[in-house]
Amino acid sequence: MNRKAAALLTACATLFAVTSCGASTGTGSTSESAGASSSNLLTVIVNNPANPYWATEGDAAKTEGEKLGYKVDVTSHKGDTKAESDLVDAAITNKSAAIIIDPANADGSIGAVQKAVAADIPVFLVNAEINEQGLAKAQLVSNNAQGAALGAQEFVKAMGGKGSYVELKGAPSDNNAATRSNGFATVLSQYPDLKLLDAQVANWDQKEGHDKMQSMLQAHPDLQGVLAGNDQMALGAIAALKEAGKLETVTVGGFDGAPDAAEAVKAGSLTYTVLQPVAEFSKKAVQMADQFIKTGKTDAAEEKQAFDCTLITKDNVAKYTSAFTLSE
């Protein structure tokens, strides 16, 4: 071997050794390693900010993220898993330090979360869950079963423990819809004089709530109560009842604690709403993401973190604030 070839071989061997050491260090690290990301970007993906609940979700996360020194990109999938997947792809391309998602679908969102995890980006879920554990660093949600029980108990009280009612349900793809409906049923089944006439899906939407309420009123003109899985459906039902001249004789219950629902409680058209602490758990998700980015840990005992709901009625609505919270 001549001297020039030997020198070249030595240089290549040295380069290979350095590269191998670097690769070995990267492979030996885990997603639990502290300070793994140098990115200053947090991506927050909410459902539909046209709904004040989801708007608050994004606003609270953005405010907290910026307070902690991050650039925060808030986007929305509007319940579309394809849009959600594309937004996760964009977050990966943009090298987000963490992604906070309100999942579009309990099953359909799993793939999007898996993509982020495969790209070594920690994911934190808020408001809704996915049907697979061990992917997200945390799932922060309202205690929907507890909130449903609170609402159902107030509904029983307002109805005097008897009468006929209908139910408006949320999107079947969202586990929260079934959890709330089952929670209502657990309480109401104890009152045989309360009769469920009909239950229809209105997909968390105000217009659908209005239209479904109209059709149920035609079939059951003497109904006495409406149990709604969220405030937007409840407000749609109120509009339909008002148009039919029946609002004064029908009890309507909501769920979320939206500002317009609180105003309806003040006005007396909505009997109550169940406040979900969306601002609280959205803020907490950002704090957990920040901690994980810096330390590689969340310090949470369990992946799922449930936040208790609060009942809003005429008695305490004056303490309500616009950020989905009750003042002390």
Image: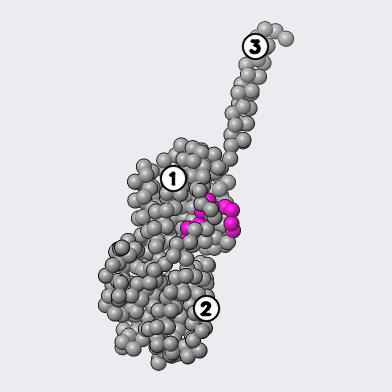
For marks 2 and 3, the one nearer the N-term is 3
Q: Who's the residue at 30% across and 71% down the image?
A: 317
For marks 1 and 2, the one nearer the N-term is 2
How far is mark 3 from mark 1, CA to CA?
48 Å
User: For residue 325, which quarter of the picture?
Assistant: bottom left
Q: Position of residue 289 (x, y in %)?
A: 46, 47
Q: Which mark is residue 290?
A: 1
Q: Looking at numbered disc 3 in the image, what kind of residue is underneath it?
A: Ala
At label 1, counting other C-alpha atoms closer than 10 Å, the crowd grade (few under 14, some 14-19, many 20 or more) is many
Report the mark closest to the observer, 1 or 2.
2
Which stretch appears magenta? 132-141
Mark 2 sits on what residue?
186
At label 3, counting other C-alpha atoms closer than 10 Å, the crowd grade (few under 14, some 14-19, many 20 or more) is few
Q: Looking at numbered disc 1 in the image, what kind of residue is underneath it?
A: Asp
Q: Position of residue 267 (x, y in %)?
A: 27, 77
Q: Who's the residue at 40% across and 83% down the image?
A: 157
Q: Give yes or no for residue 140 being in the magenta stretch.
A: yes
